[in-house]
Image (spheres, rainbow, N blue to C red):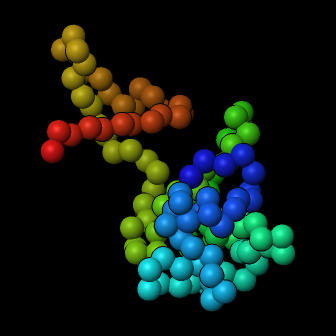
Amino acid sequence: MLLTSLTTTTDELHRATGWEAKPEGLCQGEICVPAPGGKRNDGSIDVAVVAERLAMPLVHDKASATWSLGPSTLGGRALDTAVLPPLSLTSFDGAPFHFSSLLGRKVILAAWASW
């Protein structure tokens, strides 16, 4: 979920993450997590509280003035590190491309499969 501030609406949170703000807390299906302070008096959602309570990664990019809220890791799927293991692919011209050459740069890796 991409944001320009650390507040959002209940509808937008639900649409983007599947988590719904209810009186008992943040809920997804049968799972509810208490989130005191998550819903503000004006009805908006405090994204920092959501990120903490649901173990969601939250990062800020100053250059673009945006925040990114990642998926919940409550199910034990948290990454141990953000370090890519040694990986290389063959480029279109047949030369090897090593991802380590991108060290220190932000990279988006998109994958596609036909199945």
Residue 21, relative to residue 14: is it above or below?
A: below
Quadrant housing residue 53: bottom right
Residue 25 position, x and y percent, is 63, 83
Residue closest to the eye, 10 or 5:
10
Q: How many marks?
A: 0
Left/right of residue 6 with respect to residue 108 in the rendered view? right
Residue drawn at point x = 45 percent, y = 56 percent: 81
- As rendered, which of 69 and 24 lies closer to the eye? 24
Q: Is residue 48 visible?
A: no
Answer yes or no: is residue 11 visible.
yes
Q: Where 48 sits versus 104, above or below?
A: below
Residue furthest to the right: 41
Q: Quadrant of residue 111?
A: top left
Which percent across, then down, holds residue 70?
52, 57
Q: Is residue 59 above or below residue 25?
A: above
What residue is at 71 percent from the left and 74 percent from the top? 38
Question: Against 48, is 62 above or below?
Answer: above
The image position of residue 55, as x and y in percent, is: 55, 70
Q: Residue furthest left?
A: 115
Depth check, front residue: 111 or 28: 28
In the image, farthest residue toward the bottom? 24
- Outermost residue, front side: 11
Q: Position of residue 57 (x, y in %)?
A: 56, 60
Q: Which quadrant is home to the C terminus?
A: top left
At x 39% / y 32%, what residue is drawn? 100
Looking at the image, which is closer to me, 11 or 103? 11
The residue at 45%/36% (across/down) is: 108
Report whether 94 appears left or right of 109: left
